[in-house]
Image: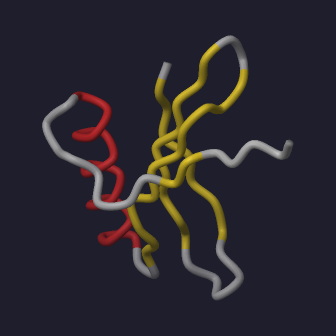
Amino acid sequence: MAYIRKFKTTSGATGVQVCYKEQGKVVRTVHVGSAMSEAALERLIREAQGIIDGDKKPLFDLKKFDKK
């Protein structure tokens, strides 16, 4: 299952990620970008939805690191 995650960055921008869950755990995170305005945030959310729908290829793929 994939979902869009929005969060506040330390600079005050809103970050957007696409997160993928398997069996209740996040297994992959794709960083879409950070926005300082509502218009930019809406664009990033549309881009994130495109990644989920398979229309777009993600620019950055942040793999979850195993702590072994």
Q: Position of residue 60 (x, y in %)?
A: 38, 60
**Vertical relation: 8 (above or below) 37:** above
Q: Residue at x 53, y 65 (%)?
A: 15
Q: Extreme bottom residue here?
A: 11
Q: Is residue 57 left or right of residue 22?
A: left
Q: Residue at x 55, y 48 (%)?
A: 63
Q: Extreme left residue here?
A: 55
Q: Is residue 64 left or right of residue 17?
A: right
Q: Is residue 3 left or right of residue 27?
A: left
**Vertical relation: 59 (above or below) 21:** below
Q: Is residue 23 left or right of residue 52?
A: right
Q: Nearer the viewer, residue 31 or 66?
A: 66
In the rendered view of the protein, which quadrant contains the C terminus?
top right
Q: Nearer the viewer, residue 3 or 37?
A: 3
Q: Extreme top residue here?
A: 23
Q: Position of residue 50 (x, y in %)?
A: 22, 40
Q: Residue at x 26, y 61 (%)?
A: 43
Q: Position of residue 52 (x, y in %)?
A: 32, 32
Numbered-mark total:
0
Q: Nearer the viewer, residue 41 or 34?
A: 34
Q: Residue at x 29, y 60 (%)?
A: 59
